[in-house]
Image (cartoon, rainbow, N blue to C red):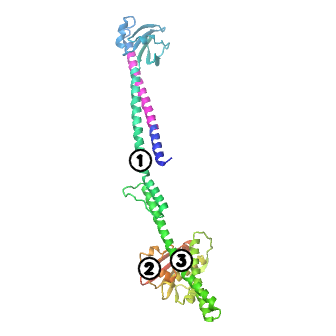
Amino acid sequence: MKIRTKIQSYSSLFLSVMLILLSIIVLIAFFWISVEREQDLLEDQASLIEENIVTKDLISGDPDLLEPYTPDDGMVRIFDTDGKLVKSFTDEEDLEGLKVQSVNEKGFDLTEVDGDYMLTYRHPYPEEGKKLGMIEVTQPQDTLLDHLSTLSLVLGGASLFVILLSILAGKWLANQILKPISIMSGTMMDIEKSGEFKRIPLSDQSKDELQVMGASFNMMIERLERNYNQQQQFLSDASHELKTPITVIESYSSLLKRWGMKDAAIQEEAVEAIHHEAIRMKQLTEHLLRAASQAEPTVDLEEKIELISFCEQIAQTFRRTGKREIKIQSEFKEIFAMSISSKLEQVLVILLDNAMKYSESGIRIMIKRQGNDIFIGVKDQGTGISPEHLPHVFERFYRVDSSRARKTGGNGLGLSIARSLVESFDGKLEIQSEVGVGTVVTIILSHQILI
């Protein structure tokens, strides 16, 4: 069953049940109030007869004397102490055969005579403390039943009209509620068929939950489209970057196969080129594997690290391989902290590798302690990063300049991996950069100082 049908059916059913219950309550209340009103009238008539029963000789006199005390289309009967009928008056012959009740206490009875309902009130009348007999006043309830029937028809007709109106209103309401969902469903089907990323048109006037759902859907589509474009860009760049080393390796291996075994110079040149290109491919592959493995939880133990000597060892490796000046700056001779050495080393390698790629001058590693925080900054004097790119540099596969990235071999994964590693041991990674001046990437270790 469709949601639209459910809304219409359930709303109409609920309203129908409520109207039926309301009609029943109104009918019962009307009947109860009307019967009480009739009882009060009969009780007043009986009291009036009791007051005049002796003074006006209503018992032994002419029966017509009871006519002023008789309700319209009703009957008055007077019984003695033995329950025998003494006097009666009625204009309706059907009431004369009404059964005499042998009840000596006051009260009301609702009886049926030939399909008509009669309300009877019995009232004992004493004189000077002695019980003389019983006064009985009877009145048909045809008018009450007619009014009750008319009210039932009015309530039934009004309820039916409201139910029919509710069906139309439920249909309109279902269309209004489900319109954004139908648009969203249609948009999803269009995306599935065309493969294009589409968004739902939203109205600025509505601020309900469906508006929020539509906005969330559009945000999700934007994120999917952005990730898809980044992946497509990365695949394109990766294929371009891999194509070159593969071509070089293939060319030099062919050269070795033909001439290299006899020529030592060609052999040395080919081996060096193949080795260099193999390292480039290995680095790219490692970056991809690291990016894919960041989602998997790992358990590493923290250990005590002397940060200045730790950074010096890593810097020394880069001095030899990169033939670049790298200085360690700190006002302290030793700073001990608890951290995961393997991850911290990997972060420093990524930061130093980036500094080597994007600058030609010297690099500085600045280590300082401030309060409960330790700051390890890697500063280069390269071209810098413009302000509009800074918020995105930690995103996977994001590259500030694709042409420069191809030239340096970058793939947009280094800083993303570095931030994930730093956050894994409860640290922070911040970046500051100025175009034409350089870039500083800082590792912040909080509450991990030992000395």
Q: Which residues are magenta?
A: 17-46
Of mark 1 and mark 2, the one earlier in the sequence is 1
Quadrant in the picture for residue 303: bottom right
**What residue would you read off at disc 2?**
385
Cα–Cα gap, marks 1 and 2: 54 Å
**Picture coordinates of residue 332, whole percent (x, y):** 53, 84
Q: Is residue 135 magenta?
A: no
* Helix, strand or loop at mark 1: helix
Disc 1 to disc 3: CB gap under 8 Å? no
Outermost residue to the right: 261
**Picture coordinates of residue 35, whole percent (x, y):** 42, 23
Quadrant in the picture for residue 347: bottom right
Cα–Cα gap, marks 3 and 2: 26 Å
* Helix, strand or loop at mark 3: helix
Outermost residue to the front: 258
Look at the magenta stretch and give its main secondary structure: helix
Taking depth in this image into account, of 37 and 359 the one nearest to the observer is 359
Disc 1 to disc 2: CB gap under 8 Å? no
Label 2 CA crowd tier, 10 Å (few <14, some 14–19, many 20+): many
Of mark 3 and mark 2, the one earlier in the sequence is 3
**Which one is in front in this view, the residue at disc 1 or the one at disc 2?**
1
**What residue would you read off at disc 1?**
173
The amino acid sitting under disc 3 is Ser
Q: Residue at x 37, y 10 (%)?
A: 66
Q: Is residue 303 visible?
A: yes
Taking depth in this image into account, of 327 and 259 the one nearest to the observer is 259
Label 1 CA crowd tier, 10 Å (few <14, some 14–19, many 20+): some
The amino acid sitting under disc 2 is Ile
Q: Residue at x 42, y 26 (%)?
A: 31
Of mark 1 and mark 3, the one earlier in the sequence is 1
**Which one is in front in this view, the residue at disc 1 or the one at disc 3?**
3
Instruction: Determine which of the numbered discs, if any, sits on residue 239 in the image.
Output: 3
